[in-house]
Image: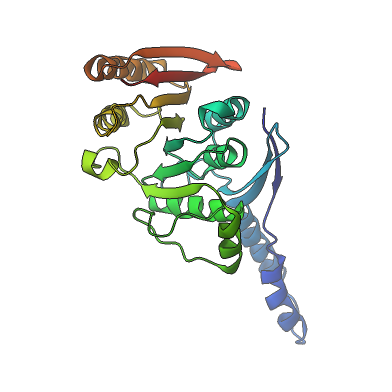
Amino acid sequence: MCKCSLFHDNMMPRAALFFPQHESTAAEPLDELYDTLADVLKEEESTQCYKNYFLPTGDCVTLSESTAMVSGGTTGLITWDAALHLAEWAVGNPEVFSGRTVLELGSGIGFTGIAICKTCQPKTYVFSDCHHRVLRQLAENIRLNGFVPEPGATWGIQTEPQGQEVEAKNCQKLKLVIAELDWGSVTEKQLVGLQPDVVIAADVVYDPEIIVALTGMLQKLSSCRADRAAPEVFFASTIRNPDTYQLFQAELGGCLSHQGFNSFASFPITDSVVEMNKSSFW
């Protein structure tokens, strides 16, 4: 299992800008002022943090993420358990990704993808999500770990290259793309340029309202393959609501039948509430 350490941004410099000015006057310090400022600093510190995840290979993934389960109207700003399981499995099976084009659906803030990019040597890695705040945080975390997205290959968001990014780009061998990808509205024509050999996703089976769009996305990906090769699909899912998961399996079963998947297997990883699903198109 990936180990994690946690450290917060240092908020004290903000206080340091104010207190010397206040204390340089003859005014009596107000306890209420200090108490209020302490509450503000505590609230700010509780919303964002940095985490170090140490992989079995010894590599480290550093992420900026929210400390709240729901933040900015999304659950995509934290790292969920299924992402840890999927990354752990990927690190142990690098041959699945080595030299191949990988598309990740619902990348969130990037843990799984960054771990794969650091350890599995993919040829191309496409991170994708649909929430603008998540995409911004994802881009920051990618840069934080020394990777640079391909210029002009980013869909829907823009990132300004910085000095350290240019230096990293010179030694970066893989092509890395960040895509704003809405499963319900994206067209096959838009997906043609991706041509993934492998499609992965972690913890995307949590809301019955998005399951039809998710399986529809898999159908679009299978239809737009230029060479008719068989992209492999790996999903890691935390089963919170058995009914939702059964709905996913039922919709996926229809997708398998309609699109001609040649195999489907489900097997547990580590514990009974996280499952890995593997499918292949033909």
Picture layout, residue 108 above or below residue 163: above
Residue 103 in percent (x, y) is at: 41, 37
Residue under the image location 61 percent in, 17 percent down: 270
Q: Is residue 99 visible?
A: yes
Residue under the image location 37 percent in, 13 percent down: 263
Residue 58 in percent (x, y) is at: 73, 37
Residue 247 horizontal side relative to residue 242, left or right: left
Residue 217 in percent (x, y) is at: 29, 32
Residue under the image location 68 percent in, 35 percent down: 55
Residue 185 horizontal side relative to residue 280, left or right: left
For the N terminus, the image quarter is: top right
Picture layout, residue 130 above or below residue 43: above
Residue 164 in percent (x, y) is at: 61, 64
In depth, the one of 141 and 49 nearer the eye is: 141
Residue under the image location 61 percent in, 30 percent down: 91
For the C terminus, the image quarter is: top left
Residue 100 horizontal side relative to residue 19, left or right: left
Residue most extreme to the front: 227
Q: Quadrant of residue 29?
A: bottom right
Picture layout, residue 182 above or below residue 240: below
Q: Quadrant of residue 257?
A: top left
